[in-house]
Image (cartoon, rainbow, N blue to C red):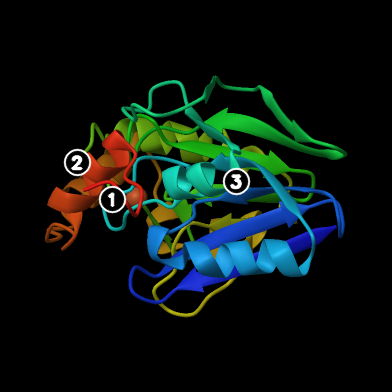
Amino acid sequence: MIFKQLFDKKSSTYTYIISSGKGREALIIDPVIENTEEYLNVLKELNLKLVKVIDTHIHADHISGLSELATRTSCSKIMGERSASEVIDIRVKDNEKIKIESIELITMHTPGHTDCSYSFLMKDRIFTGDTLLINGTGRTDFQNGNPIDQYHSLFDKILKLPEKTLVYPAHDYKGNEVSTIGKEKKNNPRLQVNSVEEYTDLMNNLNLGNPEMMDIAIPANINGKTLNKI
Ligand code: FE
């Protein structure tokens, strides 16, 4: 299997390139528009054919590379069914399968950071978007975010996975690349709560400023901005 984790320094976003092998089909999760050439170069070097691109949710802190990659490669654009994006080809529901050749991702609707947030389970690992971060969880104060939904997405879904499941988030701000469900249960300060009320209180008192790119990124990601489209 080919598995590449790429990092966008400006937005601290992780992008994942996955394929069953050289010369085969590939999929990309959470691309950043400015890094499109880098992704295309990796695909070219490995002789991969990009067939699917997935965004875990509508991002507020960067413009997604989803539409640009689709323009350049004619891959399918995939998001959860509640996504506000106007350019999605395949809208997935909870507990569906996204397949490319021998690779299978199981979709998990994990709302809370946004109402359209999805996580994707691939055998021994899960891509958690901004639902579960390493030592953190995604904020819940805009884009129909909701700490109660996020509590249930975390405690009733993601954290029920085997403890050794690898956790690959959409962002990290401190250089962490991967964690496990077991480590997060034990160490993640946001998860050391005893009730949904306690989690809601915690999330409602973070007092965070808005992301710098928010007013540009959200409409661009809804409209499916490409590099040529103003
Ligand atoms: Fe986000």
Identify which residue is drawn at 60% across, 46% down: 73
Say which of marks 3 and 2 sits in front. 3
x and y, in percent, of residue 107 in the image: 62, 30
Is residue 76 in view?
yes
Q: How many marks?
A: 3
x and y, in percent, of residue 77 in the image: 52, 34
Residue type at mark 1 is: Arg
Q: CA distance from mark 2 to mark 1?
A: 8 Å
Q: Identify the disc placed on residue 139.
A: 1
Horizontal relation, residue 130 to residue 140: left or right: right
Q: Nearer the viewer, residue 60 or 160?
A: 60
Marked residue nearer the N-terminal end (3 or 2): 3
The residue pinned by badge 3 equals 73
Q: Nearer the viewer, residue 76 or 133?
A: 76
SS at mark 2?
A: loop
Residue type at mark 2 is: Phe
Marked residue nearer the N-terminal end (1 or 3): 3
Tell me: is circle 1 under 8 Å from ligand 1: yes
Q: Nearer the viewer, residue 160 or 35?
A: 35
x and y, in percent, of residue 63 in the image: 32, 54
Residue type at mark 3 is: Thr
SS at mark 1?
A: loop
Res 149 quadrant in image:
top left
Q: Are marks 2 and 1 in contact (CB under 8 Å)?
A: yes
Above-or-below relation of 156 to 183 = above
Q: CA distance from mark 3 to mark 2?
A: 32 Å
Horizontal relation, residue 157 to residue 60: left or right: right
Identify which residue is drawn at 55% across, 19% down: 93
